[in-house]
Image (spheres, rainbow, N blue to C red):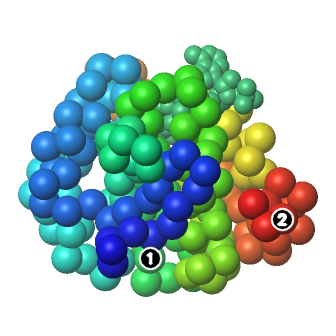
Amino acid sequence: MKNILLEGKNLRLRRASDTDLNYIMKLQFAPENLKFIVPFDENYHREILSSNDKLDIIVEEIDTGERVGYFMLRELDTPCAEYTHVIIDKKNRGYGRESLKLLLKWTFEIKKYHRVWIDCKDYNSIALHLYESLGFVREGVLREIILTNGVYENLIVLGMLDREYFTQPLFRRS
Ligand SMILES: CC(C)(COP(=O)(O)OP(=O)(O)OC[C@H]1O[C@@H](n2cnc3c(N)ncnc32)[C@H](O)[C@@H]1OP(=O)(O)O)[C@@H](O)C(=O)NCCC(=O)NCCS
């Protein structure tokens, strides 16, 4: 099927379609996710479906076909892709790790980007642990850049270069 980007052991990544928009909106606004992200409206996600520089990717279980999360990518028309949203619905089962490894493989081995970057609230310890354990490097702090419920919050910027990806033992022919 042409919408499949990559398959791993348990999960596959595929392009989102218009039938996934409700799911994406539900995940964005679920309280356990919303506190860690900046959501976009449905029209924005609808435009992504036909965009050349942005992509919404659905993560789904191979066995059941059930959707378990989604990624939103931007800046895909540059050598430096951005992972804008990383959300896993079925949490704490290793799906974040497996799906991000697949996404990194797609980013560097298939699409040949030079760099990927991501930003993350400084108190999002689960996401920071996950990103750094996959080899993302902390590159800096955007201090008090985001206003959430009247409070300015810091974002940590993390990045990975293609040469870092290709020299990581973790990703040797995974
Ligand atoms: C961050 C997120 C994507 C991780 O996905 P996940 O599928 O739950 O993560 P995994 O099960 O693959 O676990 C990843 C690591 O986090 C750890 N972890 C997961 N849940 C945890 C928890 N509740 N407390 C402490 N550690 C936890 C796991 O132990 C694992 O580390 P390890 O492999 O070294 O043991 C998911 O929690 C999520 O969608 N969070 C809300 C949205 C968000 O914060 N997105 C990121 C914005 S930058």
Quadrant of res 80: bottom right
Q: Give the class, few, some or many, for how many residues have Cα within 10 Å of label 2's Cα (few <14, many ≥20).
A: few
Q: Is residue 42 left or right of residue 131?
A: left
Q: Is residue 41 left or right of residue 161?
A: left
The residue that label 1 is drawn on is: 76
Under mark 2, the amino acid is Arg
Under mark 1, the amino acid is Leu
Whether residue 20 appears in this view of the structure is yes
* Residue 53 badge: none
N-terminal of the pair, mark 2 or mark 1, is 1
Q: Which residue is rendered at x = 23% and y = 67% of the image?
A: 48
Quadrant of res 13: bottom left
Secondary structure under badge 2? loop
Position in image of residue 53 (x %, y %):
35, 77
The residue that label 2 is drawn on is: 172
Viewer-side residue, 138 vs 67: 67
Whether residue 157 appears in this view of the structure is no
Number of on-image labels = 2
